[in-house]
Image: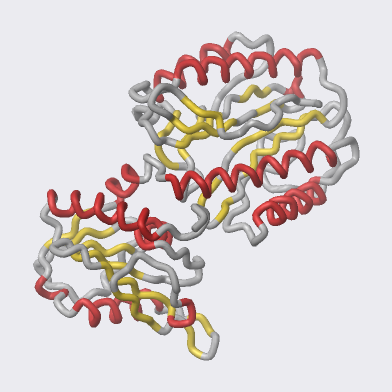
């Protein structure tokens, strides 16, 4: 079995980690509503147009998955899989969550007796016929903390997504020249990622504009002297990449090269500094100081963030959080410098895995403004 496929054993291990928490917190039943966490714990990934549910019973670890009847998975880490009617004559129902909740309640059979429920406050719906005196405990913080440490099956999908960006940048360097249209570049890059994955993307992300800090592609042609920031985040089977390269439309100016050299110093500091236990906030401050020494340009956004089932997750390389790097984190670091003199600036971003003693770079493709 490939790590890119559903790894039932990995899902079962994650279920056991969750059960340890549920038992310590005296939570009797956990209900999982988000498609991301159903994938994380049970395996199948459902399209956003569906609203499946999963439940884990704390006493014996029994897992029930309620899935769209026309999307019943063959491979999963559930003990019971029961269908709900997500469509009528091929029309998607707008009351899917209510219907899935009814099916789940019927399958569990004892919902009125459960006193302490673990749910995702961010997306839980109160359709289950639970007792009026039941207590709800928010599982979102624990889920997000669990996801910090990437398992091998998760890392394999992230690295596949990153390989998609590598191919996209190869194509971009062939395309970008004076007169190229942003929409044409976007279309070609999406096609390159699909070819790399051999299947449709489950997410596209991020920035595809020339001579701009970011944004969706426009019907605009690149001009000589401009810098083209491509901050790409394709997702493979639900797991996101997120890395950036800045490509010069024509020749690189002296100021542009100076700014690029300063960003390379920032990466040198990041790669020499990050290890388990290091403060993300302190790293942000240190890299900000490195970038402030540039002859041109300002750095005025976050330094980076974790990636996984969501484009931005922990750890946060941002002074508004006080995270600490942990072994198993996968994060993106994206120093940038911006100034009109740079036409309009540059952002370069690498992805890293935090190891026991440091980091492993996951984005080996070229960093230069012009090859």
Residue drawn where x is 62% and y is 25% of the image: 336
Picture layout, residue 110 above or below residue 282: below
Residue drawn where x is 53% and y is 84% of the image: 91
Q: Where is residue 47 in the image (x, y as percent from the top left)?
A: 51, 67
State the image quarter where residue 27 is shown: bottom left
Q: Residue furthest front?
A: 1
Q: Nearer the viewer, residue 36 or 17?
A: 17
- Identify the colour scheme used: secondary structure
Side (left or right) of 299 relative to 25 = right
Q: Quadrant of the C terminus?
A: top right
Q: Where is residue 278 in the image (x, y as percent from the top left)?
A: 37, 21
Picture layout, residue 68 above or below residue 6: below
Picture layout, residue 43 above or below residue 245: below
Side (left or right) of 45 relative to 342 = left
Q: Which of 27 and 14 is in front in this view?
A: 14
Side (left or right) of 24 relative to 333 = left
Side (left or right) of 342 relative to 101 = right
Q: Residue furthest right?
A: 179
Q: Where is residue 317 in the image (x, y as percent from the top left)?
A: 45, 29
Q: Position of residue 240 (x, y in %)?
A: 54, 47
Residue drawn where x is 52% and y is 12% of the image: 289
């Amino acid at each position: 079995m490939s790590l890119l496929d559903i790894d039932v054993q990995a899902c079962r291990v994650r279920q056991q980690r969750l059960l340890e928490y549920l038992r310590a917190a005296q939570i009797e039943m956990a209900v999982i509503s988000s498609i991301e966490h159903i994938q994380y714990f049970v395996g199948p990934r459902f399209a956003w147009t569906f609203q499946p549910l999963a439940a884990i019973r704390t006493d014996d670890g029994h897992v029930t998955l309620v899935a769209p009847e026309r999307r019943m998975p063959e491979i999963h880490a559930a003990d019971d899989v029961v269908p709900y009617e997500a469509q009528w004559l091929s029309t998607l129902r707008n009351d899917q969550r209510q219907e899935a909740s009814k099916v789940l309640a019927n399958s569990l059979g004892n919902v009125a007796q459960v006193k302490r429920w673990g749910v995702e406050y961010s997306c839980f719906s109160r359709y289950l016929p639970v007792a009026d005196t039941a207590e709800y405990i928010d599982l979102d913080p624990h889920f997000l903390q669990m996801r910090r440490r990437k398992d091998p099956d998760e890392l394999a999908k992230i690295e596949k997504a990153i390989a998609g960006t590598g191919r996209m940048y190869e194509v971009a360097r062939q395309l970008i020249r004076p007169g190229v249209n942003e929409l044409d570049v976007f279309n070609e890059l999406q096609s390159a990622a699909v070819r790399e994955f051999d299947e449709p993307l489950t997410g596209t992300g991020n920035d595809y504009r020339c001579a701009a800090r970011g944004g969706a592609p426009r019907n605009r042609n690149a001009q000589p002297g401009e810098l083209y920031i491509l901050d790409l985040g394709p997702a493979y089977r639900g797991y996101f990449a997120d890395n950036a390269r800045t490509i010069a439309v024509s020749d690189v100016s002296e100021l542009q090269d100076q700014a690029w050299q300063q960003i390379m110093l920032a990466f040198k500091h990041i790669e020499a500094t990050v290890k388990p236990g290091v403060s993300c906030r302190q790293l942000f401050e240190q890299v900000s100081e490195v970038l402030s020494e540039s002859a041109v340009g300002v750095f005025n956004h976050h330094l980076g963030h974790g990636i996984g089932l969501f484009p931005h997750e922990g750890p946060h390389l941002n002074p508004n959080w006080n995270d600490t790097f942990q072994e198993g984190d996968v994060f993106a670091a994206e120093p940038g410098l911006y100034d009109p003199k740079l036409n309009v600036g540059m952002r370069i971003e690498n992805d890293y895995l935090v190891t026991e003693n440091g980091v492993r770079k996951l984005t080996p493709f070229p960093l230069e403004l012009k090859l």
